[in-house]
Image (spheres, rainbow, N blue to C red):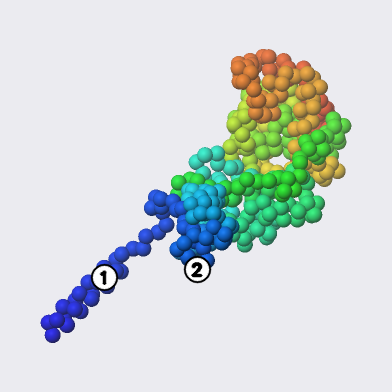
Amino acid sequence: METTTEQSVAGVVDSTAVTATKRRGKYLSRRVGQNGNVFQRGFATTWNPTAPAYGRFWTDTPGCDVRKRRVVSLGICHSRSVARRKLRELIELEGINTREYFSKNTAPTTTFRAQATKWIESLSTRRRRPVKPATVFCWRNALNKWILPRLGDRLLADVSNSALRELVEDMAAAGLAAKTIVNYSQIVKLVVASAVSAEGDQLYPRTWNHDFVGLPIVRKETQHRPTITKDGIAEVLGGTKQRYGIIYALIAGAGLRIGEALALRPENLSTDCRVIHVRKSIWRGQLQEPKTRNAVRDVDVPEVLADALRTYIVGKSGYIFATAKGNPLSQRNVLRALHATGKKIGLHAFRRFRTETLRRARVPEDLIKLWLGHSKETITDYYATGLEKDLAWRQQWCESAGLGFSLDGLYGLQKHKPIARAKAA
């Protein structure tokens, strides 16, 4: 009886010990590399210089916890040492013992859809260069409409040049513009590159072959960039309400982006309204930082437009261009009002008009970049930052360039505004 008791107790102890032992995972630090071994059919102990030789070594397979043995043919080898050298060269050529191979083949199997979801959610919160909500919104739409229906269910390891080629062919067949195809292809590359190991190394490094993929070449000279003429602006100002007309005049006469214009408050204007301090932007009703660091700037305004602004902001607080509840106007409503005048163009056309006006007036390129919020390109541009602080010089050029269009239509609407209020009362 005592022996039985001791055996049972020992059995319990042994079982507990086995349960507590954790299975060791795959770690590169525990691998010293492998040379494999060579053999001939029948595993003959004596080497036959006229018989074919074979080699075998261990390989990792994605999604499999156990390594598999791989056998390769080495051809006719005159000696065992020659066969071993060939096998070592093959192992080195395929990178079997490298960190990249280990990370790629021991990583958990992940679909492109799962990685894309993880990537898109991290863009706006990452520490380095967080992406603006507008950009995230566009990328998410591209994923949902074009990329995920075609690549979403594939393993991330299988999304390479051939998979991207199929996507490019589908987009080209659907008639998408070359720039759009290039942008959507870049999203695929970013998703694949976002899968990294615990050490920060890419799990699936790729060498993208644009010729094989068939990626189109974007020719800037053929891209569609609609603009508007001074007569077109006059028609717009004369055919819309004052609240929208002053916005069109502002983005055409100062070169503001529509989001920057909608975010303006009276405190963002100088006392005489000759200078606009761009500090914020509006996107889908939400206040955010401007598009880039260069978009935070001071924009000079010609006197004729400053006079219209002084009249318009009298008694206003909060957002200058606001709804009845005090919320900023929607970009969609501003665009809809523009299309109602018969001009089927985008709001960015007014910024292009302002650029043309400044170029015709031979305004210095430093000032054009400053007023439009474009980036500096050379070291010389950074050396000349003192020019930005010369207010008198800036306003002299601003007045010299002028608006490039007439505000008569806008003033006409202002004259009718009190009559409209009286009827409404």
- Asked if residue 203 is positioned above or below residue 368 in the image, the reply reads below
Furthest-bottom residue in this view: 1
Nearer to us in this view, 285 or 5:
5
Could one spot residue 119 in this view of the protein?
no
Q: Which residue lies under the disc numbered 2?
A: 42
Count neighbours of disc 1 (C-alpha within 10 A) and say few if under 14, some if 14 to 19, many if 20 or more: few
Q: Where the N terminus falls, by quadrant?
A: bottom left
Q: Which residue lies under the disc numbered 1?
A: 16
- Which residue is found at the position 78% from the left and 51% from the top? 172
The three-letter amino acid code for the residue at tag 1 is Thr
Q: Between marks 2 and 1, how big is the CA–CA gap? A: 44 Å
Nearer to us in this view, 417 or 372:
372
- Which residue is found at the position 22% from the left and 72% from the top? 13
Residue 393 picture quarter = top right
- Asked if residue 372 is positioned above or below residue 201 in the image, the reply reads above
Judged from the image, the secondary structure of the residue bearing numbered disc 1 is helix
The three-letter amino acid code for the residue at tag 2 is Gly
Give the x, y percent position of residue 224. 81, 40
Nearer to us in this view, 266 or 215:
215
Q: Where the C terminus falls, by quadrant?
A: top right
Give the x, y percent position of residue 101. 51, 51
- Which residue is found at the position 14% from the left and 81% from the top? 3
